[in-house]
Image: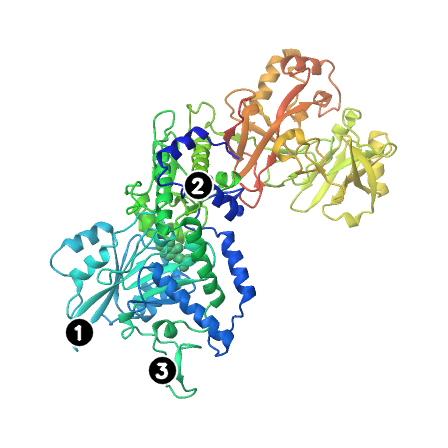
C-alpha cells in the first residue's frame, strides 16, 4: 500500500476543519460502518456508493420482528407492508422537500427505468412535439429518442451555450406549431442536474428559464431532470413547484449503496391527467374484464404506474438507509460540505502536478469552479499525459490502479456526448471505430492519437482525505516523470527467437512461433527432466555435459515432442497424452526440493536416454500433486507455482549485457562463450547500456506484463559448449572477474507473468516490442 504523507494530511485538516469530517467523526464512521473499505481505495462512488453496516443491522431487526405480506392482499401482514410503503413514499417526498399534493413517487427499478417511463407515458403529438436533451446526457436519456422516433416527433441535442442563449433570447422559435384542434402540444426537455461523466452541475434554474421562454397557450415544455448523479451527495429541493422540474429520475443505490434495484420517478401530481399509461398489470387497475377491452387505472399515479408487485422489502430497507445516513452524516448538506472540501483539494493537487520539464501531468475535464459545490459535484474526470505531451491511455491507468487496489472507473462512462465534447473525436471517427469492432466498455483507449475515454474518480459521503492522498501518491509514483527519459522509453524488443528447455538441462529449443505462456512459464518449458534411477535426483548438465546434445523439439501444431540425439533414432511422443505411456508416480529431488514425479516406464524411452548418457535414468515430468513454488527471497511472487526450472518461471537476458561480458573476457575466450548457455527464455535487444535490466521492475512485452524479481545466479553450466557438450576450463573464473558479486556471477533477470495486467490470450511472439514501465527503487 502506498504511504501517505502525514504532513499533507495535517495541512488539509487544518485548512478544511469546518467542512471536512463531520466534526471529527469520519475516521470512526469509516472504521465502524464501512469495514469493507479497509483494503481498497474506493473511488467509484458515482458507480455506486457503499452501504453502511447499520442499515443492515436495523433492517435485519425489522425483518425479524415484522411480518410483511404482499401489499396487494388485504391481510394484516399485507396492510403492514402497504402502510410501510406509504411511509417510505412520504419519507422520499420529505427528503426532496415536497408533499404528495405536489409530487408523486413512482418506484422503479432504477433511474434508467424512471427515464424510460417518462418516454413511454409522455403525451407526444405526432409531428408537433419535440424532444431535446443536453449533449452531456447519460445514455439512459439518449435512449429516449427511440420514443421520439416511434411517435414521429423530432429530437435534437443542445449544448450549454445554446441553452443559455435560448433562455436569454426573446423570440420563441422552439414553440411547436399550434394544433388544429387547439390541444396543447407537449415537448420534453431533459438534462442532468450533475453530469455523471465530469461532475459538472447544470443550473437548476434552467427548468424555469426554459418554461418561461417556451410555454404559451398552445404549447408547453415539460422538464425531466436526471438527478441520479446529483442527489448522491446533495440535497435537491422541489419545494417551489413554479420553478421545479416536472419529472425527476433517481437511483437509490447511488445515494446509499443499498438497497439496489430501487429507483424512483418523481412526477408533478398535476400531470396525472395527461400522462398516457398504456400497459396495465397486477396492481395498477381498479377495474378490468378479461375478454372485453375494458379496464380502469387506479386513481393515484404511483398505483397506476407501478406494474406488478413492487420490490417492497427493498423499499422498506430504504427507510433504514435514510435513517442510517442521517444518523451518521447528519444531513446531505453536511455530505456536500465534506465531499466538496475533498474534491477541491484533489483538483488543486492534480492540476498542479508537473513533469520534470514543466509540462502538466493531468488534463481535467470540467470547466467548473471546484471550490463551489453549486457548480461541481465530487467527481474528477481526467486523462494523464507523458512529459512529451502524448496521452497515457486510460486502460494503463486502470491496470496499474488495479494492482494498487485503487478502484476507479475508466472509459466513455455511458456518456458519448462528453467523449465528443472533450476529446475532439468526431462522430465520424467514432462511427468508424465502432464499425471496425470497438465496443463500449472495451480497453481501446486512444483512436488516431486522441483519447476516447478517460479516468473518473468520484467521492461519496464516507470518502476520506486518506483515499484522496492515496490517489495523488499513486499518480505521482507511476506517472509523474521526474527526470528525462534516458533509456526508459527507448524501444526494446525481443530477439527473433524465444528459447525453452523442454527437458531440464538438455539442449534448448528455439522458436519464432507465437508461444502460449502461463504463470509457470512458456508452455512446455522445463516440463520434463531426467532422473537418476539410483539416487532419484534430477540429472544436471554440469555432471553429464552430454545432456547438451539431447535435443528436444516441440511441434505445437502437430502436438508432438521429438527428441533427437547424435547416433540414435529419434523419439516421438505425443504431447498431453500421458496415458499413451505407462507412467508411475515416484519421489524425486530437484534443486533440493522433494517432489513427486511421473516416470515414463516405456523401455524405448528409458533406454534412449540411459544409452546416450551411459547412466541408468528415466524421463519424468512433474506430477500435479506436488507443485513447487517460487522461493520467498524472490519477493512478492513467492508461492506462485513453478515448473521444473530452478527458481522462477521466466528468465530474461539482454544481448547488450552479453556483448559486454564477451568483450571483457579476452579475445581467446570470446569464441567459446555462448548466450544459449545462459538459458534465457527471452533475449532482449536495444537496451541502452549493459546490465540496465537489473534496474527494471515492470516490463511489458506485447500485451503481456512481467514483474522482474532479481538477478539470476549462475553455475558452471554456462561454461559448457551447447554444441559439443565440452566444458571450457577457466571460463568460469574469467567470467567471475568481469561480473561478480561476492564471487557469484549474476546474469539475467528472473521474471513472473502478471496476468492481472495482461491481455488474454497469453501469448508471446518473438520480435515483440518491449517497454519498461517501472524501475526498481534503489534501496
Ligand atoms: C447513474 C446514472 C444514470 C443511470 O442510473 P441507473 O441506476 O444505472 O439506471 C442516469 N443518469 C445519470 C446522470 C447517472 O449518474
Q: Is residue 259 above or below residue 546?
A: below
Q: Decide if residue 687 is on the left or right side of residue 349.
A: right
Q: Residue at x 61, y 17 (%)?
A: 661
Q: Nearer the viewer, mark 2 or mark 3?
A: 2
Neighbours of disc 1 within 10 Å: few (<14), some (14-19), many (20+): few
Would residue 372 be seen by someone viewing this image from the given angle? yes
x then y, percent, for residue 391: 38, 37
Q: Decide if residue 545 is on the left or right side of residue 762.
A: right
Between 227 and 481, the one nearer to me in the picture: 227
Q: Are marks 1 and 3 in contact (CB under 8 Å)?
A: no
Between 302 and 611, the one nearer to me in the picture: 302
Q: Which residue is mark 3?
A: 296
Q: Residue at x 52, y 63 (%)?
A: 62
The mark that comes first in sequence, 1 or 3, is 1
Between 551 and 747, the one nearer to me in the picture: 747
Q: Secondary structure at mark 1?
A: loop
Q: Nearer the viewer, mark 2 or mark 1?
A: 2
Give ligand 1's quarter of the image: bottom left
Q: Which residue is mark 2?
A: 464
Between 196 and 104, the one nearer to me in the picture: 104
Q: Which residue is mark 1?
A: 179
x then y, percent, for residue 70: 50, 74
Amino acid at each position: 500500500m502506498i504511504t501517505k504523507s502525514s504532513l499533507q494530511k495535517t495541512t488539509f485538516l487544518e485548512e478544511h476543519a469546518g467542512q471536512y469530517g463531520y466534526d471529527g467523526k469520519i475516521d470512526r464512521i469509516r472504521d465502524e460502518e464501512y469495514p469493507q473499505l479497509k483494503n481498497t481505495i474506493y473511488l467509484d462512488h458515482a458507480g455506486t456508493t457503499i452501504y453502511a453496516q447499520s442499515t443492515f443491522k436495523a433492517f435485519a431487526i425489522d425483518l425479524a420482528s415484522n411480518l410483511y405480506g404482499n401489499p396487494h392482499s388485504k391481510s394484516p401482514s399485507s396492510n403492514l407492508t402497504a402502510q410501510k410503503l406509504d411511509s417510505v413514499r412520504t419519507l422520499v417526498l420529505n427528503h426532496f422537500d415536497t408533499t404528495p399534493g405536489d409530487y408523486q413517487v413512482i418506484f422503479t427499478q432504477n433511474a434508467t427505468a424512471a427515464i424510460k417511463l417518462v418516454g413511454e407515458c409522455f403525451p407526444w403529438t405526432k409531428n408537433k412535439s419535440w424532444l431535446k436533451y443536453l449533449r452531456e446526457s447519460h445514455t439512459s436519456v439518449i435512449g429516449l429518442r427511440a420514443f421520439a422516433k416511434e411517435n414521429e416527433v423530432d429530437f435534437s441535442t443542445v449544448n450549454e451555450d445554446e441553452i443559455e442563449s435560448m433562455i436569454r433570447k426573446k423570440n420563441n422559435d422552439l414553440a411547436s406549431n399550434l394544433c388544429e384542434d387547439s390541444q396543447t402540444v407537449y415537448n420534453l426537455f431533459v438534462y442532468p442536474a450533475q453530469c455523471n461523466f465530469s461532475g459538472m452541475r447544470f443550473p437548476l434554474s434552467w427548468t424555469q428559464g426554459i418554461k418561461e421562454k417556451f410555454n404559451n397557450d398552445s404549447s408547453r415544455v415539460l422538464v425531466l431532470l436526471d438527478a441520479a448523479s446529483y442527489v448522491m451527495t446533495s440535497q435537491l429541493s422541489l419545494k417551489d413547484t413554479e420553478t421545479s422540474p416536472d419529472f425527476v429520475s433517481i437511483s437509490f443505490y447511488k445515494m446509499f449503496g443499498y438497497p439496489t434495484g430501487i429507483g424512483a420517478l418523481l412526477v408533478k401530481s398535476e400531470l396525472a391527467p395527461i400522462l398516457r399509461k398504456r400497459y396495465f398489470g397486477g396492481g395498477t387497475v381498479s377495474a378490468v374484464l378479461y375478454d372485453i377491452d375494458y379496464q380502469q387505472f387506479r386513481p393515484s399515479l404511483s398505483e397506476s404506474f407501478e406494474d406488478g408487485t413492487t420490490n417492497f422489502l427493498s423499499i422498506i430497507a430504504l427507510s433504514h438507509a435514510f435513517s442510517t445516513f442521517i444518523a451518521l452524516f447528519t444531513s446531505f448538506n453536511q455530505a456536500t460540505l465534506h465531499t466538496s472540501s475533498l474534491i477541491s483539494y484533489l483538483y488543486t493537487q492534480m492540476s498542479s502536478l508537473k513533469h520534470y520539464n514543466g509540462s502538466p501531468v493531468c488534463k481535467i475535464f470540467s470547466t467548473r469552479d471546484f471550490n463551489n459545490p453549486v457548480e461541481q459535484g465530487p467527481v474528477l474526470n481526467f486523462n494523464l499525459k507523458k512529459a512529451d505531451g502524448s496521452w497515457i491511455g486510460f486502460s494503463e491507468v486502470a491496470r496499474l490502479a488495479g494492482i494498487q487496489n485503487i478502484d476507479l472507473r475508466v472509459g466513455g462512462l455511458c456518456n458519448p456526448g462528453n467523449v465528443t465534447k472533450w476529446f475532439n473525436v468526431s462522430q465520424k471517427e467514432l462511427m468508424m471505430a465502432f464499425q471496425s469492432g470497438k465496443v463500449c466498455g472495451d480497453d481501446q483507449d486512444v483512436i488516431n492519437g486522441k483519447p476516447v475515454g478517460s479516468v473518473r474518480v468520484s467521492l461519496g459521503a464516507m470518502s476520506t482525505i486518506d483515499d484522496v492522498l492515496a490517489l495523488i501518491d499513486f499518480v505521482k509514483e507511476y506517472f509523474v516523470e521526474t527526470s528525462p527519459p534516458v533509456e526508459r522509453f527507448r524501444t526494446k524488443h525481443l530477439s527473433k527467437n524465444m528459447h525453452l528447455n523442454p527437458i531440464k538441462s538438455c539442449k534448448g529449443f528455439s522458436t519464432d512461433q507465437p508461444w502460449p505462456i502461463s504463470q509457470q512459464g512458456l508452455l512446455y518449458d522445463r516440463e520434463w527432466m531426467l532422473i537418476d534411477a539410483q539416487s532419484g535426483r534430477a540429472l544436471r548438465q554440469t555432471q553429464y555435459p552430454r545432456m547438451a546434445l539431447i535435443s528436444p523439439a516441440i511441434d505445437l501444431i502437430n502436438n508432438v515432442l521429438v527428441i533427437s540425439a547424435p547416433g540414435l533414432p529419434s523419439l516421438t511422443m505425443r504431447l498431453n497424452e500421458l496415458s499413451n505411456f505407462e507412467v508411475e508416480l515416484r519421489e524425486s529431488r530437484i534443486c533440493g526440493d522433494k517432489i513427486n514425479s511421473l516416470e515414463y516406464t516405456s523401455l524405448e524411452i528409458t533406454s534412449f536416454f540411459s544409452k546416450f548418457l551411459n547412466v541408468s535414468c528415466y524421463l519424468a515430468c512433474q506430477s500435479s500433486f506436488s507443485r513447487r513454488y517460487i522461493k520467498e527471497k524472490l519477493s512478492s511472487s513467492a508461492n506462485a507455482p513453478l515448473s521444473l526450472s530452478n527458481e522462477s518461471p521466466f528468465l530474461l537476458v539482454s544481448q547488450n549485457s552479453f556483448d559486454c561480458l564477451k568483450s571483457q573476457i579476452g579475445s581467446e575466450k570470446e569464441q567459446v562463450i555462448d548466450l544459449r548457455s545462459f538459458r534465457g527464455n527471452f533475449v532482449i535487444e536495444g537496451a541502452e547500456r549493459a546490465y540496465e535490466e537489473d534496474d527494471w521492475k515492470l516490463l511489458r512485452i506485447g500485451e503481456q506484463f512481467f514483474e522482474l524479481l532479481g538477478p539470476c545466479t549462475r553455475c558452471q553450466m554456462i561454461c559448457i559448449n551447447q554444441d559439443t557438450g565440452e566444458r571450457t576450463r577457466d571460463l568460469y573464473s574469467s567470467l567471475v572477474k568481469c561480473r561478480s558479486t561476492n564471487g557469484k556471477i549474476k546474469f539475467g533477470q528472473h521474471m513472473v507473468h502478471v496476468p492481472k495486467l495482461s491481455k488474454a490470450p497469453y501469448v508471446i511472439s518473438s520480435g515483440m516490442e518491449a517497454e519498461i514501465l517501472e524501475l526498481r527503487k534503489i534501496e
